[in-house]
Structures are given as C-alpha cells and as structure tokens.
Amino acid sequence: MRGSLASVTERFGDAHREFGCCDTTFRIQATGIRADAAATAARETAESLEAQLNAFDEASAASRLNREGEVANEHVARIVRRGLEYNDRTGGVFDIHQGRVEHDLKTFSRGDSETPPTAFDTGTVRVSGSHVTTDVELDLNGLAKGYIVDRASEAITGLGRRGFVSGGGDMSPPTGPIAIESPYGDDTPLKILDTDWYVATSGGYRRSRDGTDHVYDPTTESLGSRHESVTVVARRDCMEADALATTLAALPLVEARDVAAEWERLEALIVHDGVFHTTEGFDTHVLDT
C-alpha cells in the first residue's frame, strides 16, 4: 500500500494550468481526487478542440469547411446547430454565415489590412449528423470559445472533484467569487459575481482599431460594439452565455435590454455610456458587500 505524502497529493489536491488558447489566456483549476490528471485532461481537451475549430489554421476542420464547403466533424456540427438556433432566435443578429466578415475584421484589427469589411453575406448551411455543408464561409468564433470552455469543464468534473475553466471572459460556473473586469483600464471591477451559472463578457475595449472591434450586426450592417461592456450569466452553458454576450453587444441599448429580459434563464449587465443597466435578476448573482 502506498502511504507517502506524494501519493496522497496525487490522489487528492489542487492543480492549476494556464496556457494560450483561442487567442486569449485559458486558466484551469481542479480540486479533489486526481486533480492534476483532470487539469491535464482539460488542457488537452481545450488544445485539441482549438486545433479543430480555429478558422485561421488551414489544417483545422473549421478551415476546411470554409475552404471546401463541407466537413465531417462532430464538434463543428454541434456548434453549427447551435449557431443556427441563435440565428433564428435573435432574428439574424447572431449570424454564423459571416465567416468572411469575421476574417476581414480580425485582419483589420491586427493591422494586416487597411480597411474593415463593407458588405455582409448570405448563404445556406445544412447539418446531418456530424456532416456539415455550406455555400458561404462560416463564423463559428462567437460560439467556439464557449464550447471549448464547456468541454474542458466536463473533463474536470468527476466524483470527489470540482473545477473551474476560464477562457478570457468566458467561464464555467465559478467555484468562488469572480470579478467583472472594468472596460475603462482601471483595477476596480465592475461587479463581483457569486454565481453557479456560466459567465461571458463581450465588448470592444480589449481589441479595437479606429473604433472597430470584433462585434457586428448583419441586420443593420453595422460594425463595432454599441456598449462599453456586456456581461451575461446563463444557466444553460457557456456557449449560450458567449452567444448572448455577443448579441447584446451588437444591439442598440433598448433592443439589448429587451432581448436580455425576455431570454429565459439568463441575466445581463450592460454598461452603456458609463451607466449600468441590469436585468431584474442580475443582482442575485452579485456578491453582497
């Protein structure tokens, strides 16, 4: 029988991982039985999925789909199904058909091109099992990071173990209080959350160039987030929080507030012109101070 301290630590303890993924920093924390192995499995899951879903990697399944018009990949298929759901539920504001626009926006924000995109696309996408076909380039980035957080979180979960995954502003249910980063460049958080729901934050303050960022609204053909910051907590999963944070960031204030208020099992904080706008139940997810 092994009775050393090292074997006890291997079976029960804390483990942390920090690494680059999805053009941001991922942080993984696992506590409990075989925490170290679980944290390693979660990182491997995240990196494997990034390799399949990164549209800027020519070898990825997402890139092959956009290049060849079809691909067989269960993860791409799941994301496309959810993307089509949100396209329908948001009246086209969340639109995965804009892969060319997303690509051109990213190259512009990186300084690799001098002009942002000026036109939006339409097309047809079909999903059958794990097989996806499309006649237009797809933008899966509005869901991919949330999807990766969800799958990495599943890799951590187990009997006698819990964990937390953060990918930039996208998070699995936190295991303790977390701060919402200020978009104003100071160290004072907007709020401290204490929630068992999934969290996502969107806004143009992290990556923008000449007032243009990664957010767009195809229904009005407008570019750029309309608010300083949007934070969403969602009961369903991180994919939903990710998609709705992006959607609300693209909408004018009144419409964003209406969508957030009507969406079931979702609460939101929208910071617009320095004013905090929250849904009725958002404060139930805020730490009392």
Image (tube, rainbow, N blue to C red):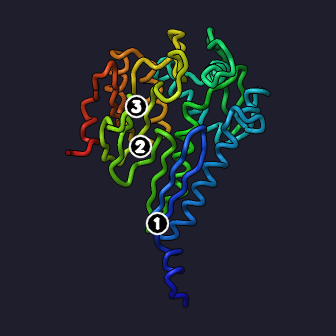
Q: Dot 1: what SS?
A: strand
Q: Residue at x 53, y 17 (%)?
A: 212
Marks 1 and 2 in Cβ contact (< 8 Å): no
Which disc number belongs to residue 198?
2
Q: Is residue 58 left or right of residue 193?
A: right
Q: CA distance from mark 1 to mark 3?
A: 32 Å
Query: Would you say residue 65 is visible in this rendering?
Result: yes
Please state, as top left, top right, bottom left or bottom right, where the C terminus lies in the image: top left
Sequence-first tag of 1 and 3 = 1
Q: Position of residue 83 (x, y in %)?
A: 56, 29
Mark 1 or mark 2, which is nearer to you? 1
Q: Is residue 244 above or below residue 217?
A: below
Classed neighbour count for the residue bearing mark 2: other residues with Cα under 10 Å, few (<14), some (14–19), many (≥20): many
Question: Where is 118 relative to 1, above or below?
Answer: above
Q: Disc 2 or disc 3, which is closer to the eye?
A: 3
What is the spatial separation of the Cα atoms under label 2 and label 3, in whole angstroms?
A: 24 Å
The three-letter code of the residue at mark 2 reads Tyr
Q: How many marks?
A: 3
Q: Which of the two labelled residues, at mark 1 and mark 2, occupies the earlier sequence position?
A: 1
Check residue 14 in the rendering and tell me which mark sits there, or answer none.
1
The residue carrying mark 3 is: 185
